[in-house]
Image (spheres, rainbow, N blue to C red):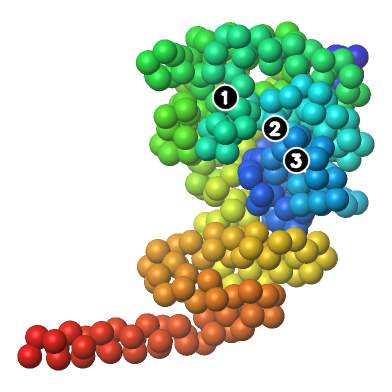
Amino acid sequence: MQEKKTQQIQQILKSAKVPFYLAPMFQVNDLAFRKMCRRHGILLCWTGMVNSHMWIINQKDRKTFFETCEGDRPLIGQINGNDENELLTCAQDLESFVDAIDINLGCTQHIARRGQYGYFMVNTEEKRQNVITLVENLTNKLSIPVTAKIRLLSDKDGNPDIQLTTEFAQRLEKAGISLISVHGRHKKMNKSGDADASAIKSIVDAVSIPVVANGGVTAKIDGENLVKETGAVGVMIGQALLVNPSLLETDNPDPVALTREYFELYKEHPIDFLIAKRHVFNFFEQIIKAKPKIAEELKKVHTPEEMEVFLVNYESGKFDQIEEEQDETSKITTEEETQ
């Protein structure tokens, strides 16, 4: 059985064609965005984090957590949670729609701490042993490969413990994990700072299963370098793809074109508009840093139709004119107050 799953993982990686993959993220890996990434060459995608508890108790709104369609492959479904039965049920429900199931063992966000999943499932030896038992159960009961996403474990002082992380990766492999993604940062770093390439390489050298590197990639060249430095089979990219889904093609995308492309796909696969708008904030990230007024105008948008009006106004320079008028008014007011 394990040999078959190893072959399945190899086929997934082969079908990806390039060693760049969409990382699992909270709420923003919607189907429209995945299709957009695939258009621009990112063929292997992870789903957003599917919370197994919410999946069980909120069956009417499952589309909020997971949606797919023909052509949305290769696809790895990431699940999170801390209840073994709920995780197994969720994994079995997704099994027919994805190529592998990924367990989130690396998230350090507040929501993960509150739910005691992600990194908080593996931050003690007792918890790590429970995860090994969970993995053995999942791999025995699922017909598709089980993968895991981890980050660097910390010692009692909160510093990265490379040996402990490497040993845990070996235990995961022995338990039946077919691929490991390694976020090369420790808990204190969260999403900031460079990934520790040498730590990821230590894990690559210590296991015989494929390892995917993750962390700190902001451009295609960063990903290429991380793969070379670590020996990983590929690199998983999150925030940089949110800002630029065409990252493999250009470092200077047109945010207007990206927004229109996304909403073309959004019409086919609508979701909560707030999530859709979050994508636009990401596309305009660099412009908003230079022109905060753009963010104020974007906050006023509540429908796809209003989004198109926003884009037309942006292209026409209307927001620049408004900002100049406000600056002039502010200048006059300041001069009057000082007289």
> Which of the numbered marks, if any, corresponds to residue 80?
2
Mark 3 crowdedness (10 Å alpha carbons): few <14, some 14-19, many ≥20 = some
Q: Nearer the viewer, mark 2 or mark 3?
A: 3
Which residue is depicted at the point 81% across and 23% down?
85
Left or right, 5 with respect to 42, comes to: right
User: Is 98 or 44 nearer to us in this picture?
Assistant: 98
Which residue is depicted at the point 91% across and 24% down?
143
**Marks 2,3: beta carbons within 8 A:** no
Specify the quadrant of the image occupied by residue 105: top right
- Mark closer to the chain start, 3 or 1: 3
- Mark closer to the chain start, 1 or 2: 2
* Residue 319, x across and y down, in percent: 45, 83
Pick out the residue farthest to the left. Answer: 339
User: Is 108 or 42 nearer to us in this picture?
Assistant: 108
Which residue is depicted at the point 63% across and 43% down?
25
Amino acid of disc 2: Asn
Q: How many marks?
A: 3
What residue is shown with label 3?
54
Amino acid of disc 1: Phe
What kind of element bears circle 3? helix
What residue is shown with label 1?
120
Q: Nearer the viewer, mark 3 or mark 1?
A: 3
What kind of element bears circle 2? strand
Real-space Cα separation, disc 3 to disc 1, in angstroms: 18 Å
What kind of element bears circle 1? helix
Whether residue 161 is situated above or below residue 283 in the rendered picture: above
Q: Quadrant of the C terminus?
A: bottom left
Which residue is depicted at the point 75% across and 70% down?
264
Amino acid of disc 3: Met
